[in-house]
Image: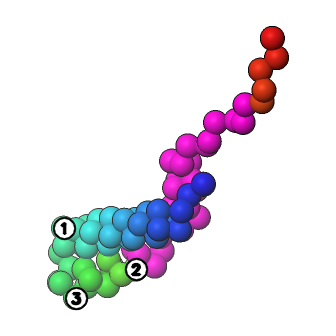
Amino acid sequence: MTLPIEIAQAVRSACVRAALEGYEQAQVAGLCQEGAWEVAVDAMRSLDLKVVLRETALEDPLPPPPRGPSSA
């Protein structure tokens, strides 16, 4: 089971990653700092949170199945 703090950390990491990538791409494209910041914010806004949540859930290993009494 994925804890709420793990979900929050995954979303925060994805937002930071998207913002940094967007800002860097905008700077390379020649935008000013304000324009690059707008691109970074837009990258965070357009982040697909369903994908982040799905990936976070996939990282969470399933608990082992319950073991019943042994019959010999």
Q: Residues within 10 Å of mark 1 (few under 14, many from 20)?
A: few
Q: Amino acid at mark 3?
A: Glu
Image quadrant where one finds the N terminus: bottom right
**Circles 1, 3 touching at the beta carbon (< 8 Å):** no
Q: Is residue 35 above or below residue 68?
A: below
Residue drawn 20% across and 79% down?
31
Q: Please state which amino acid type lies under the numbered disc 2.
A: Asp
What residue occupies the far bottom of the structure in this picture?
A: 34
**Foreground: 32 or 62?**
62
Give the extent of the magenta segment.
43-67
Which residue is nearer to you in this view: 16 or 1? 1
Inspect the magenta stretch and tell me whether residue 45 lies in it: yes
Q: What's the amino acid at mark 1?
A: Val
At label 2, counting other C-alpha atoms closer than 10 Å, the crowd grade (few under 14, some 14-19, many 20 or more) is: some
Q: Label 1 vs label 3: CA separation?
A: 14 Å
Which residue position is annotated with label 2?
A: 42
Q: Earlier along the polypeptide chain: callout 1 or callout 3? A: 1
> Quick one: quadrant of the C terminus?
top right
**Disc on the earlier residue, 2 or 3:** 3
Where residue 43 sits: x, y (%)? 39, 74
Give the residue number, with chain letter if any, for mark 1. Answer: 28
Residue 51 place in picture, x, y as percent: 55, 59
Whether 60 is drawn above or below 43: the answer is above
For residue 44, side relative to residue 4 (left or right):
left
Disc on res. 34: 3
Cα distance between the residues tagged 1 and 2: 17 Å
**Rendered position, 23 above or below 61:** below
Identify the mark at residue 10; answer none if there is no mark: none
**Tag 2, which secondary structure?**
helix
Q: Nearer the viewer, residue 20 or 29?
A: 20
